[in-house]
Amino acid sequence: MTDKASQISALLAPTVTSLGLELLGVEYLPSPGGAVLRLYIDLPAPAAGEGDGEASRAVGIEDCEAVSREVSAQLDVEDPISGNYTLEVSSPGVDRPLFNAGQFQRFLGESAKVVLKLPQDGRRRLQGRILKVGDGAIVFDLDGSEFAVDVDNIEKARLVPDWAALGMAPTRPGKGGKDGRNPSGREARAGSKNTDKPTKKPAADGPNTAE
């Protein structure tokens, strides 16, 4: 995450936790026409030794709307962003973003796409299996070789879904309107427009189920 995104994430995490949810991370995308502030939320991961008590439940549109309402009110008071911006609250989806070492640790053995802040060995982008996490670095398997990346040098990262294992093998573009990325379209998202004098009324802009 950027420094701004990290600052906002630290500010909003307690509010999201108070709603029984986890703030996975924040994306802050500034632009001349107005920034986008995107929050990814999920159910808290089970503690070690606990069962999947909430495995049958997934983040839904109601969760996203509740977070959007509470966070919007907090942002109005704290005012960490100057100018106009759009707030989006979303479930992570099957190609979930990864924001910290703990999240990489949770998905050891899975494949991820990563964009680096600074090039490393001539690379700014890479895709590989997550081998291990430790000492402030993530180690990936790239074509049979280990490739270690400092956590602080990761700009953004996402899991690469195993579509076949999910029973959602990708189809070619133009076939039934699907392009192979999240073909089931199942993701919960709520958004609200924040202007200099905003009206805080969250509106659903995505399907009402979540991955």
Image: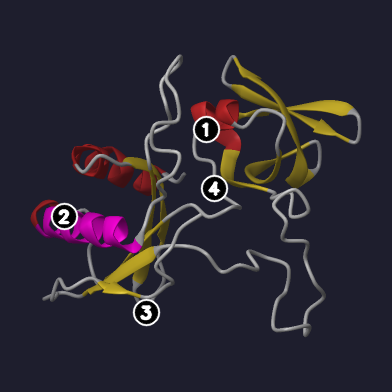
Q: Earlier in the sequence, mark 3 or mark 1?
A: 3
Magenta region, residue range:
61-76
Determine the CA span between mark 2 and mark 1: 25 Å
Is mark 3 in CB contact (under 8 Å) with mark 2? Answer: no
Q: Earlier in the sequence, mark 2 or mark 4?
A: 2
Where is residue 64 drawn, in percent x and y?
Answer: 31, 58
Please tell me whether the stretch drawn in magenta is mainly helix, strand or loop. helix
Q: Which mark is residue 33?
A: 3
Where is residue 94 drawn, in percent x and y?
Answer: 59, 52
Amino acid identity at mark 4: Pro
Q: Is residue 36 visible?
A: no
Name of the residue lying farthest toward the left: 77
Label 1 crowd bin: few (<14), some (14–19), many (20+), radius 10 Å? some
Q: Is residue 55 visible?
A: yes
- Residue 211 position (above or below residue 7): below
Please indicate whether residue 9 sits to the left or right of residue 122 in the image.
left
Label 2 crowd bin: few (<14), some (14–19), many (20+), radius 10 Å? some
